[in-house]
Image (cartoon, grey):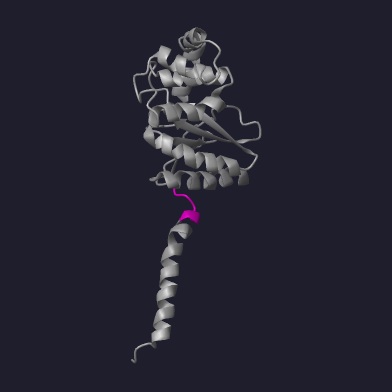
Amino acid sequence: MSSLPRAWRHLFAIAALAASAWLPAAAQTAAPVEGLDYALIADGQPWQPLDGKIEVVEIFSYGCVHCFHFQKQVDTWRAKAPRDVRFTYLPAAFSAGDNFARGFFVAQAQRIDARSHHAVFSAVHETSVLPRSGASIDAIAAFYVTQGARSQARFAAAMASPATDERLNAARAFAVRSGVEGTPTLIINGRYRVMGRRLEDILVIADQLIARERAQR
């Protein structure tokens, strides 16, 4: 058989290059696979009543560098999320001594969490104002004063209060029954635990599971 003309060889090369660039995107549109892309949570329950929404909970830790990097992707994703999606941050409160989790819950109760969330990540991973682990209640309370808390003493007292203990215990129970083993982890409607192998996969899989939940309404 005679060889292809040079022009045809060039066209085939371009087509092959285009196909190789297209394949990863095509793979992302494939239906997610249970056990590979997500885990089905037995008897799973949402963190909060759905009230007609699709709940996406991110289990995170301020000391987790992967959560810090993932935050930038979440910001972009949330800006484009449909109105029926409710995104909720929930600290991975596996230890009663997790002062970052305690600080988060008090900030949430005082309604300064939207302002302070990114700032805490920056204080830990960019400016080192706070350590990745072992930060004291007083150090965290002092930082939250810079984010709008009115009193360091009252914020510290709230971090150690029974009300915060209760929220910490509830968060731990949710993470345990959802099978969370690390951060960041997304839980969809209390039914699905996303298992992306890369940070870039997590939100793609989440979108697919959100679409599945919407279709099943």
Which percent across, then down, holds residue 24? 43, 58
Residue furthest to the bottom in view is 2
State whether residue 202 appears in this view.
Answer: yes
Residue 169, can we see it? Answer: no
- Position of residue 173 measured from the top left corner of the image (x, y, whole percent): 45, 23
Q: Which residues are magenta?
A: 28-34
The prevailing secondary structure element of the residues shown in magenta is: loop
Q: Residue at x 37, y 18 (%)?
A: 135
The reply to whether the magenta stretch includes residue 19 is no
The residue positioned 55% from the left and 19% from the top of the image is 148
Residue lying at 38% horizontally and 87% vertically, measured from the top left:
4
For the N terminus, the quadrant is: bottom left
* Residue 102 sits above or below residue 193 on the image: above
The residue drawn where x is 39% and y is 31% is 125
Q: How many marks?
A: 0
Q: Is residue 120 above or below residue 159?
A: below
Residue 217: % across, % down: 64, 42
